Amino acid sequence: MINLFNTQIDTLSVHRVGNKSRNEELFISEQPYNVTDEILPLIKEYFFRPFRDKEENYYQFAHDVHLDYHDMYNLATEVFSNPSTAHEVSKKITRHLYEQSNHPHIKNGEVYVAYLTNVSIDNTPVDAIGIFKSEIKTDFLQFEEKGASLEMMLQQGINLNKLDKGCLIFNYKKDDGYKILTIDNNRYDARYWLEHFLSVDAFQDENFMTKKYMKFVQDFAKDVVLPAEDKKEEVLFMNRSVNYFAKNDEFEETAFLNEVIDNPDLIPEFKNYKVEKAPKYSIEDVTSFPIANAAVSDARKKIKNVINLDTNIQIKLDFVNPESAEKFVEKGWDEEKQMYYYLVYFNKEQKA
């Protein structure tokens, strides 16, 4: 988890990259940008807001042979080793980005490279490198008094409410390839920013593993439990699964299966499904890992606990008290009406 509330911009360099395939120019500033007190709060909000609002999916620099051969990893290490080189290294970073700007759809734009201090990640204060790119220009009007009239002038500029691309490289977990957050709001070429420029893979920490395994379990519930049982059992299975993750610090697959699967016939189905689907979730050899509480909370919000009936009635089951659904909700078949029904027991209606 990151906290950017007290983060300071130590140095800021501003350059411009064109599209190399269209022979557009590269502009490199000779000196760092002198950020004024008027611009500083605006530019910080422009850079940082997308990362505060975004779900934290971390990445790390990755190379097929060794990180010593990774361009961006080496440039980041150069800056972290000697922050006074931040501006000179920003030139190399911008040239590297320019070399990747070969796809005809890639837009030109300004590149901002910032050295950041007092960043908090996983409750650890660290420095970071921020790399941001603005691409989309917005039309706006300026007004000028001319005699007794106001003249309108159409101009173009950057909308400070939307950052097009950005990444934060934290001086943290260096041996793993640093921990990195990235955004890309203009996905005209999805490989350009992540693969070609940054060259990163997902950071496989407890947050990553918890999210991936819970998504795998959710898909198993939809693809296997629902067809084998019914919607109620699918919801209850996910209910028990979420509660297992919520109350444990460590995941252990055998204990998980014994606790959440009521029907023993589904255990071999689960194992077969994992063999078939595991590569999609990067959990091929995973049977235990530390559980990330924040990832469990995020996953809980996305899991539906509602049974939708074709009679325009919904039954909402409680994830906090799953035993209620098992004790007080029964499913049956009415021969006369030739319809399924749910029987719900209760003592009294609760006030909304």
Image: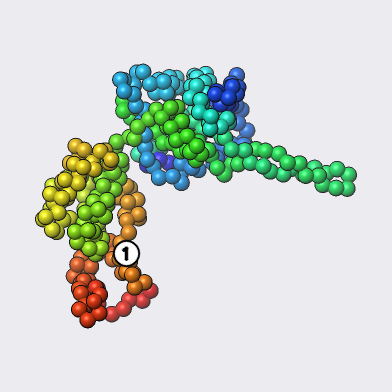
Question: What's the amino acid at mark 1?
Answer: Val
Q: Position of residue 212 (x, y in %)?
A: 29, 44
Seen at 18% across and 70% down, the residue is: 327
Specify few, some or many for label 1: CA neighbours under 10 Å numbering under 14, 14-19, or 20 or more.
Answer: some
Left/right of residue 253 with respect to residue 19 in the rendered view: left
Seen at 31% across and 20% down, the residue is: 66
Task: Indicate the colouring scheme.
Answer: rainbow
Which is more toward the observer, 35 or 51?
51
Left/right of residue 123 with respect to residue 153 in the rendered view: left
Residue 113 higher or lower than 316, as above or below: above
Where, quadrant-wise, is the C terminus in this rendering? bottom left
Q: How many numbered badges does the structure rendering display? A: 1
- The single residue placed furthest to the right in the displayed view is 147
Seen at 43% across and 27% down, the residue is: 196
Left/right of residue 201 with respect to residue 228 in the rendered view: right
Q: Quadrant of residue 176?
A: top left
- The single residue placed furthest to the bottom in the displayed view is 336
Q: Position of residue 60 (x, y in %)?
A: 36, 31
Q: Quadrant of residue 21?
A: top right
Left/right of residue 205 with respect to residue 153 in the rendered view: left
Q: Give the labeled residue for mark 1.
A: 306
